[in-house]
Image (tube, helix red, strand yellow):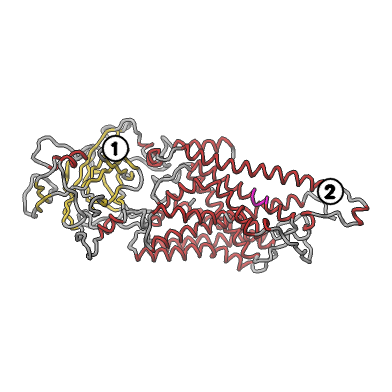
Amino acid sequence: MKVEVASFVAALLFGGIKQMQAFYLPGVNPQSFAEGDSVKLKVNKMTSPKTLMPIDYYRLPFCAPDGGPKMDNENLGEFLAGDRIETSPYRLKMKKDMYCEQLCISNVGRGEAKGVTTSKMVRAIRKNYHNNWIVDNLSAASKVEDDETITTRYWQGFPVGFIATDDKKAYIHNHVNVEIMYHAVETEQDKYRIVRFTVEPFSIQHNFEKLDDDDQTDYDFQVAKIIDPIDSCNRKKKTKVHTDYNMITSSKQHLQPASGQVLFTYDVTWVENTELHWASRWDIYLSMDDAIPAKVHWLSIANSLVIVIVLSAMIAAIMIRNLRRDFARYNRLATDEEKAEDLEEFGWKLVHADVFRPPIVSPLLLSVACGTGAQLLCMSFLTIIFSSMGFLSPANRGALLMAELLLYVMMGGVAGYITARLYKTFKGKSWQRATTLTALGFPGIAFSFFFLMDLLALTQASTDAVPFATMIVLLVLWFGISTPLVFFGAYFGYKQEAIEFPVNTSSIPRQIPDQPWFMGIPFTLAIGGILPFGACFVELYFILASVWMDQYYYVFGFLLLVYFILIVTCAEITVLFCYFQLCGENYHWWWRSFCTAGSTALYVFIYSIFYFKQLEANSFATYVLYFGYMGLVSLGLFMMTGFIGVASSLWFNKTIFASIKID
């Protein structure tokens, strides 16, 4: 995924609406350039919404820099996200426009024909792979132009090529217009900062003759002589012009098929923008140029609040009224006639000697699941808080993923403590086994699945396959930090006294009467999960789009409020069903409370199945990758919301049974 006072929440919401305007990641310093300074253009992984498998830029036969590409220094989060940032041969100079600069001639593979295996380039174009370029830590926006409109998109990069509508063949974008906006630095003389980076791709079939190494030219970088060039590539013209859409369409220029020898060229345009400040240059990316208005998120909040208000009103109308009546009835002195007829106790008071009996099904497993759920709850809360404060901006690539991982590891003490307190309360004896399962259970499942996905990524030659050194780092974090913290927390948990209950538990379990159909497990799970899911499904859509569609998500102020609404909704619906269950004299509420709130995860997984249709995926590896990770996320959400259900029901039961007199 993936988390006080009203003024603090309002400030966070305001930050979410305004997308942190005039604010930048703490600790990041701007880079200034003098006129003529070299500006590095770097390339990142290529992504596809169809395969979900990013691949290395130089896996395709693109032009490479002299001496080969060099990898950028990357953090742990970037490696885990599949980022592979490398140098490129594109030559940019601050404030120096370039006109149809030649890059290289590359053989992109064989042509398309029946019975012939398609080339890597054609397959990448048909799988809708996109380039993701970077200049001064700014991702490339993509400009697309036709006869009527000009559209600029600030996510997903720009496509490698396209499939023609007439002949259904693949064509490559072998020319790009690089437009860079800058502004002068007020505090430094003759210095400039980059505030916007846009790429407009074109497909131009250059008719050229390759130059030999000993051919003399008037230009430093020329690899071919273009025959019958377009105006921007005609070096004999005195007036230089940049390549544009009208130039290509009016000259009836042929498109460049994704086959054979291809000449790669590019234009560079520098535009001064005095209104856009460096500190707010990421705003348009984070808001995706207002592609998703804040109104949508406000409607999501309104929808969630309606669910919470209705649920709270239901609890107030049913439970508070009934509880007051029950308290008055249970606490009054019984008459001699009532004592003779044994009519003193009825309703949920009947189970007072059994309500806090340990669960009959695996108390150890419930303790471990609650401990892991508490760990995930704390991790997600802190992640959303730090994101709302701007510390995990997408401008710092890999920061969000790395923060989630490190916070999960650091919250190992919470998992150990909660597991130990619950297991001791359940009078469990295998405390070492419980602690070991907490330390190795969910992390072991996650790491094993991650390892299998890594092997799958290797077979697909995807950058999702993390290096061996990164795998060692993950194991060190797991066994070197997380596991000791789990045992440390468990030590303090077992040192504490068991949770005290207001009533004593009898030695002989009470027989449970037959339950009505609406108190059965299927019905309670269906109703218990749909309300919390309904409170957060709109934000879930945008989070899934961020994860699988390479879009930006940065309205963490909204997410924080939805996060609180999710917790409140899970707690209220679980308490409501727990009360009905006790009124039916069924005291097996431990696992039922866990599963009632945890069933939210089931709806999330079902929703992910419907969302998958948007990805247009058609390969087995994509199915395994998507549903595997969504299943893992749903498992984590199941334990997190399940812990909320157990904690709220435990508090509720202790409160109501402490309020009545027991003879």
Residue 207 visible from this viewpoint? yes
Q: Nearer the viewer, residue 219 or 166?
A: 166
Give the vertical position of 407 relative to 564 (above or below): below
Residue 589 rendering spot, x and y as whole percentages: 69, 58
The disc labelled 2 sits on which kind of residue?
A: Asn
- Tell me what residue is drawn at x 49 percent, y 35 percent: 14
The residue under label 2 is: 331
Residue 177: quadrant of the picture: top left
* Mark closer to the chain start, 2 or 1: 1
- Tell me what residue is drawn at x 51 percent, y 56 percent: 606
The residue under label 1 is: 149
Query: Label 2 vs label 1: CA separation?
Result: 76 Å
Q: In the picture, which quadrant includes the C terminus?
A: bottom right
Q: Which residue reaches farthest right?
A: 336
- Tell me what residue is drawn at x 46 percent, y 54 percent: 610
**Kind of element beneath mark 2:** helix
Q: Is residue 331 magenta?
A: no
